[in-house]
Amino acid sequence: MAAAYDRNNVFAKILRGEIPCQKVFEDAHVLAFRDIKPQAPVHVLVIPKGEYVSSDDFSAKASPEEIAALFRAVGSIARELGIDKSGYRILANHGADSHQEVPHFHIHIFGGKSLGRMLPKE
Ligand code: AMP
């Protein structure tokens, strides 16, 4: 069973407007903003507005509209930021083995340079 949603997590605060963000996209279901510690020239976080802890929680409980909105947003943002031709990587961490830091589901979009291997060599 997924962990309970923590309304004090940093992305919940961003969604409530209590913490600023560098917004790049917003619609009824989705907010996207620049990562505060970018790991690539383009590093954007795309989050659902609903309270989902992780990809596990989102995939189990989100409505078809929310799921579609999130993935449509990822594609739109990448095109808007001009990385659809050069290429980009999307990534979502879930749980301890992935080192997920913020317990509100988010998809990272990385781009703007050659991104190297998908995972570091052991
Ligand atoms: P993850 O390890 O997948 O949970 O990634 C969390 C990401 O959130 C990290 O890349 C952080 O740099 C980013 N982050 C944390 N706080 C903020 C914030 N206030 N605004 C934007 N990004 C943030």
Image (cartoon, rainbow, N blue to C red):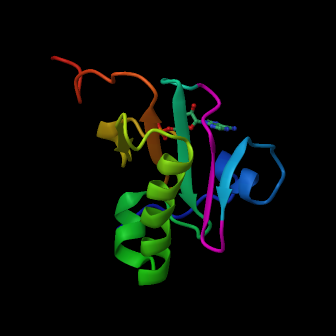
Quadrant of residue 118 within the rendered picture? top left
The number of numbered discs placed on residues in the rendered structure image is: 0
Q: Which quadrant is home to the N terminus?
A: bottom left
Q: Residue at x 23, y 20 (%)?
A: 120
Q: Which quadrant is home to the C terminus?
A: top left
Q: Is residue 34 magenta?
A: yes
Q: Where residue 95 appears, x then y in whole percent? A: 36, 47
Left or right: residue 69 versus residue 37 is left
Image-quarter location of ligand 1: top right
Left or right: residue 104 versus residue 26 is left
Q: Would you place residue 48 above or below residue 61 in this image? A: above
Outermost residue on the right side: it is 18
| Residue numbers of the magenta segment | 27-37
Q: Would you place residue 57 above or below residue 13 in this image? A: below
Q: Nearer the viewer, residue 40 or 5?
A: 40
Q: Is residue 30 magenta?
A: yes
Q: Would you place residue 36 above or below residue 107 in this image? A: above
Q: Where residue 91 appears, x then y in whole percent? A: 36, 43
Q: Residue at x 53, y 24 (%)?
A: 41
Q: Residue at x 40, y 66 (%)?
A: 57
